[in-house]
Amino acid sequence: MKFYQLSREQRLDALKASGDLDTQSYELMLKNQPIPAEIAANMVENQITQYALPEGVVQDVLINGTCYQIPLVTEEPSVIAAANNSAKLVRQWGGFQVTAKRGGLIGQIVFDHVSDIETKAQLLKTKADEIQAIAASAYPSILKRGGGLRQQKVTIVGQDFLKLELLVDTKAAMGANMVNSICEAVAQAASQWLQQPPLLAILSNHALEDLTTVTLKLPVTALTRGHLSGQTVAQRIVAATEFAQLDINRAVTHNKGIMNGAIGVVQGYGNDTRAISAGIHSYAAQSGQYQPLSQWRLVDTDLIGQLTLPLPIGAVGGSIGIVPLAKANQQLGQATDPLIMQAQIATIGLASNLAALRALVTEGIQKGHMHLQYKALAIQAGATGSEIDWLQNALSQQPIVNLAIARQLLVEKSKTEKSATHDHRN
Ligand code: NDP
């Protein structure tokens, strides 16, 4: 049987048997328990319950020659199937190639309505050594880990905003709290030097120091769909991307297809999806026109796809150390190093993009997508057990599908079954 045809328990057994899940992670996933009550109660304010999402696995994703099982958390049917589909295709042609860097997070300390602004900018520049020392004493443990303040930059913004930016090497943490602590300590000292309070002091989620680029290369022959040649499919993928470069309505949806996969992996690794999403969209808009994040080119008989994302990911810190599944997912994904997480997130983003574009320029997005969505509709209509698969297939045969039709099919099925039982008894 194929992996997707197994039961949840059998899938976990298979991952354990292959050595991808250790006993601790296996048992945790098998028990399927929520976050321990005490932890959940202390994670957020006014906590009343826990909101669960399904997690699946993208199997055998070949990145820089290493094969990974990548956890993906999402509420949307078809996302995991699509990413698996692309991962399998790309694996046959050499896999994904990734380069990832980790340069640190920027913190901003901003003063407004600054008079004599040039002089004050110069003054801040003369304080570089003191700023370095304040940063070190604000967060001494990061120095012990080999990180800390790396660069300082003073800029005048507009007429009267003065900005001091600090680039902090946060090592294996995402570093938001770390950078905020450093910024607030430096801001306090700077306010004395400038004789005015700061307007704000906080990290920036525009994370250009942590860019991660993934590339794939497929012979066009691998893209053939029905009566469409692989060459035509590849040309249409390139054309769809060119259109997205010119049209924001399309660019945003092009990028949503990338985020389907990328953000699901960010979530699986217990990272801050809002921070990563904000950073990715600011990167897409940095030219002044919101752009598609991936590029697709046809070079001779190969389709080449490339995606760059800013990914200030943490392997420690935040909720990662306290949410048991985040740790188990690191084990499953062999991802305790943020650079590996960055590589996986970008890769699943590109894999999702390939699947979406390929479907879009051939049979359309609805055919494959809706078949999987019908499962949710079947459950909504009241189907249980084997009725779910039956109703999913029955809905796929319908010219028009909606909840009323799903309910009607279910009622008809039940009537037919009752009358069959009745006939049998008679
Ligand atoms: P933490 O505040 O949890 O700090 C990182 C922790 O990881 C520290 O306690 C550090 O220990 C520990 N650690 C262990 N090993 C390492 C290592 N090798 N390298 C670095 N740190 C290590 O998390 P962050 O500062 O990363 O902040 C992330 C959180 O901030 C997320 O939850 C995010 O949601 C939130 N946040 C995001 C904002 C934004 O994006 N705009 C704004 C505010 C908060 P030690 O102290 O001993 O060094």
Image (cartoon, rainbow, N blue to C red):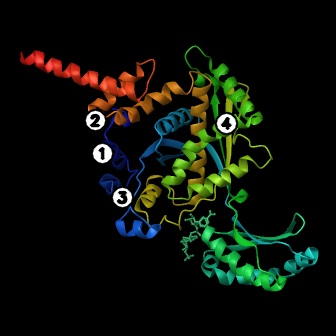
Q: Secondary structure at mark 1?
A: helix
Cα distance in 3D space between marks 1 and 2: 19 Å
Residue 9 badge = 1
Q: Earlier in the sequence, mark 3 or mark 1?
A: 1
Cα distance in 3D space between marks 3 and 1: 17 Å
Q: Position of residue 367 (x, y in %)?
A: 50, 24
**Mark 4 near ligand 1 (CB under 8 Å)?**
no
The N terminus is located in which quarter? top left
Residue 384 badge = 2
Q: Earlier in the sequence, mark 1 or mark 2?
A: 1
Q: Position of residue 274 (x, y in %)?
A: 59, 56
Pointer 4: what residue? 305
Quadrant containing ligand 1 reads bottom right
- For the residue pair 129 and 19, the one nearer the viewer reads as 129
Q: Nearer the viewer, mark 1 or mark 2?
A: 2
Pointer 3: what residue? 34
Three-letter residue code for mark 3: Pro
Three-letter residue code for mark 1: Glu
Q: Earlier in the sequence, mark 4 or mark 3?
A: 3
Q: In the image, what residue occupies the spot 59% across and 43% down?
A: 349
Q: Earlier in the sequence, mark 1 or mark 4?
A: 1
Question: Could you say which quadrant of the image residue 140 lies in?
Answer: bottom right
Q: In the image, what residue occupies the spot 57% across and 47% down?
A: 262
Residue 186, placed above or below residue 356: below
Q: Earlier in the sequence, mark 3 or mark 2?
A: 3
Residue 310 badge = none
Cα distance in 3D space between marks 4 and 2: 41 Å
